Image: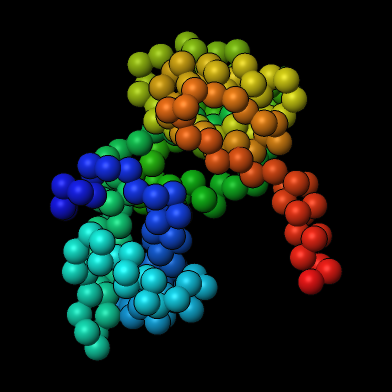
Amino acid sequence: MQAADRGGRMPDRVVNRLRWYLTALDSFAADGFESVSSWQLAERVGIGAALIRKDLSRFGEFGTPSYGYKIEFLRERIQGILCLDTPRKVAWVGSCAFRHNAAAIGRLAEHNCKLAAVFDTDANEIGAEVGGFRVLSADSIRDTLAGAGISAAVLAVGGSPAHEIARVLVDMGARAILNLSGEFLVLPEHVKVASVDLAGELLELCYYCQH
């Protein structure tokens, strides 16, 4: 891999598009494809083929004219660009969201992301078995994750506990948090937070219903 891949930080929009390319490649591989063209990728992700080629050319030559890209090779290269060739451990807080997204966990494992533990604040959830994990109390996050080397976390419990749990996760090593809590998190600048607020997204989408 070129040094530039790891050196400076890529623009967020490029990281986002690479993630969608990887998702599409996973889908093509599951469908039995061995190669794919930029046009096929474009149809799958809704991005122009020229932009796909431009994005990928930032990191080298991955395809062959008239043949396209070998899916497994391109998957491995994008994994490397996104630093997914380094094993990552992820903590998950919110067992209900984990239960509803269990299918995604297998895909995480395919890309070197291993789930470290599942936590919850709900006494009715603690102790339950979810996706092969026993749900632990959120109060045990520090003890459970001490020395675990987590890199990222999913936060899917709402209300005031979300803020304190987020700070604890950062203390335990999380440098990226997928925030499904519906709360606005204020964390140190070095922590990347991606927030998904379902109600807020729907309210925003209502604007486009008139246009």
Q: Is residue 72 above or below residue 168?
A: below
Specify the color scheme: rainbow
- Seen at 80% across and 60% down, the residue is 207
x and y percent of residue 18 in the render?
39, 58
**Nearest the camera: 88 or 45?**
45
- Seen at 19% across and 64% down, the residue is 60
- Seen at 47% across and 11% down, the residue is 143
Image quadrant occupied by the C terminus:
bottom right
Q: Is residue 136 visible?
A: no
x and y percent of residue 37 in the render?
33, 80
x and y percent of residue 137 in the render?
61, 18
**Nearest the camera: 120 or 14?**
14
**Nearest the camera: 145 or 51?**
51
- Seen at 69% across and 19% down, the residue is 161
Residue 98 position by quadrant = top right
Q: Is residue 103 visible?
A: yes
Residue 194 position by quadrant = top right
Residue at the left extreme, as displayed = 2
Q: Is residue 186 above or below residue 26?
A: above
